[in-house]
Image (tube, helix red, strand yellow):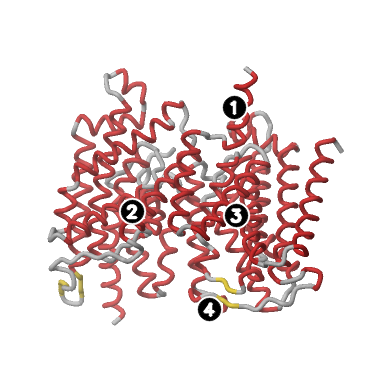
Amino acid sequence: MFLEILINAVATGLLLGSIYAALALGLAVTFGILHIPNIAHPVFVVLGAYLAVVANERGWDPILAALAGALPFYLLGALFYEFYARVFERRGEADTMQALTLFFGVSLVVETALVLKFGTNQQTVDVDYVGQSLRIGLLVMPYRLLVPALVAPVMILTLWAYLKFTYAGIAIRAAAHDVRALQVSGVDPHWIKRHAFGIASVTALVAGAILVIIGPVDPFSGRLQIGRAFAVVILAGMGAVPGTILAAFIIGVAESLVSAFLNPSWSPGVAFLILLATLALKPQGLFGASR
Amino acid sequence: MKRQDVAFAAGAIVVLLMGFGAVHAVANPYFFFAGYVIVQYVVLATAWNILGGYAGYINFGPAALYGAGVYTSALLLKAFGAPLVVNIVAAGLVGMVLGLMMGYLTLRVQGVYFAIATIALVIMLETVVHNIEYLGGARGLALIAPEPPAWAVGRTQFVFLVLLAIAVMSVALARWIERSWIGRGLRALRASEEAAECAGVATLRLKLAACAVSGALLAVAGAPYIYYASYIDPGSAFSLTLGLNTIAMPLIGGTRSWAGPVIGALLLASVQQAATVTISSELNVLMVGLALIVFIAAAPDGLIGLAERLRRKMHA
């Protein structure tokens, strides 16, 4: 009995962790690499979830809908960065407090817009595989979790390869290190950051689509995810994109174990406890360079 | 005392007397019901600004300290039937300890990391309260507050007056900090922590002091709440909207001086109180969000900064 609970708790934790990695991936780009604390990222995830809901009502699969919506979301993210840059970077300094407040304001506006359009009701999607489970011996894995959990590693691998091997990807990483050197080699850092925000926004859309497969989403679902997403990025270490998945696994398994053996009502605190512990004991994270 | 100080002290006494007079002159208790919320925001915004404005350390979790104050007070009332004064002092002490813990955190983390760590504090405290059966857990806790003294007319009026006194003292404290060596040190620290350290400013001690005072005042703001509402739950004590408003108000008013948070709080909270009667609460939040974006984009130094810029333009 104990073994069964343990195995299933760990498995659920890994599945959840994989999903958290997807949620945090965009933040790993904007915050981890570019050092822009985009606390509006989770609200973009929720926006993506709503897009999946609307498409699902017309008979689309949420994940397919997310892929179809990639281009508009890329443009939305780019536009969002453009706005941020107009406000701050042209002014010369990006004051952390003002940047955070701006992102906070944007989250509120998007949340409220969703409330006004769709109400505060929880939204769900209807797909064939929800409600069924995969059983291997003692292990029970609902497809509701398994399918989304398989999407995240694909996303991370794609993004990692993009950052590692393409010209634009290398330029994004370079923008974090030395903007002037980037300019000298003939790349517009403004363009490259806008591009990175566009990519981050697409990952938010996909993450939103899988979030709404796991469970119902309402306009305020992003709030709980803010801490989780930052916990993942900080535990992984700034700029460590592949490390994101491992950090997310740690948090997912920890939450799931607490939920199974202690009480589910304690689990929201777990990610934050890990976050605080990381900040206090090892601020550079597991895989990040020291800062 | 300088002339400005005399003027400030006179102003403070006038505010208190006006509050006392209004309690006896205005019969409708709704006026004080709404007034309580506005004055509460004056305390919160002023308290937040001591750390956020003067020292430049953004506390994104003022609701954690406020909620700690609310629950400390409720716990003492439930367990011992403690009088309000005791509760306020106890809440202040709890807030101070939490603030000091936050202060030690600044040793390791700065800037964005500090802001995120403070968000973590809210969720963790909320989770803890959720799991304490004695405090009502997620269901919340209903308590009947003791009868108010006769001079205060009614219960709502009584807590309103108590909070008004707290607000006046908070603003006076913030003003004193701003004008003393502590304020100068904090300003240096905000401009550049390394440079301040090199110039011999005791940065750690100042940060700890700012965190402790700010934390204590944020918690004190929550202490009378159980007397005001008779019912508390984790959702309202650790409310995100409350945290948001607390940050928005100094930013809208101006973070450089004590007057900024007061102006921001009076303005935003009054508009919100009027707005909750006339428009939906969603539009209310939308309004705050838009105001934040507009102020950050167009008037980063708040209304006070805007006024100064206009004055300079007129003279030039």
Give percent across and percent down for residue B181.
Answer: 74, 36
Q: Amino acid at mark 2?
A: Ala
Q: Is residue A88 left or right of residue A113?
A: right
Would you name the residue on which mark 4 appears? B133
Real-space CA distance between mark 2 and mark 4, rounded to the nearest whole angstrom: 33 Å
Point out the tag, 4 or 3, that comes first from the N-terminus: 3
Q: Quadrant of residue A171?
A: top left
Q: Residue at x 84, y 41 (%)?
A: B6
Disc 1 with disc 4 on a shared chain: yes
Front position in the image: B2 or A288: B2
Would you name the residue on which mark 2 appears? A247
Q: Residue at x 59, y 44 (%)?
A: B250
Would you name the residue on which mark 1 appears? B309
Image marks 2 and 4: residues in contact by CB distance under 8 Å: no
Chain containing mark 1: B
Q: Residue at x 14, y 54 (%)?
A: A64
Real-space CA distance between mark 1 and mark 3, rounded to the nearest whole angstrom: 38 Å
* Foreground: disc 1 or disc 2: 1
Counting labels gives 4
Chain containing mark 2: A
Q: Is residue A193 left or right of residue B44?
A: left
Point out the tag, 1 or 3, that comes first from the N-terminus: 3
Would you name the residue on which mark 3 appears? B101
Image marks 2 and 3: residues in contact by CB distance under 8 Å: no
Task: Tell me the crowding category of disc 2: few under 14, some 14 to 19, or many 20 or more residues within 10 angstroms, Cα based.
Answer: many
Q: Secondary structure at mark 2?
A: helix
Disc 2 with disc 3 on a shared chain: no
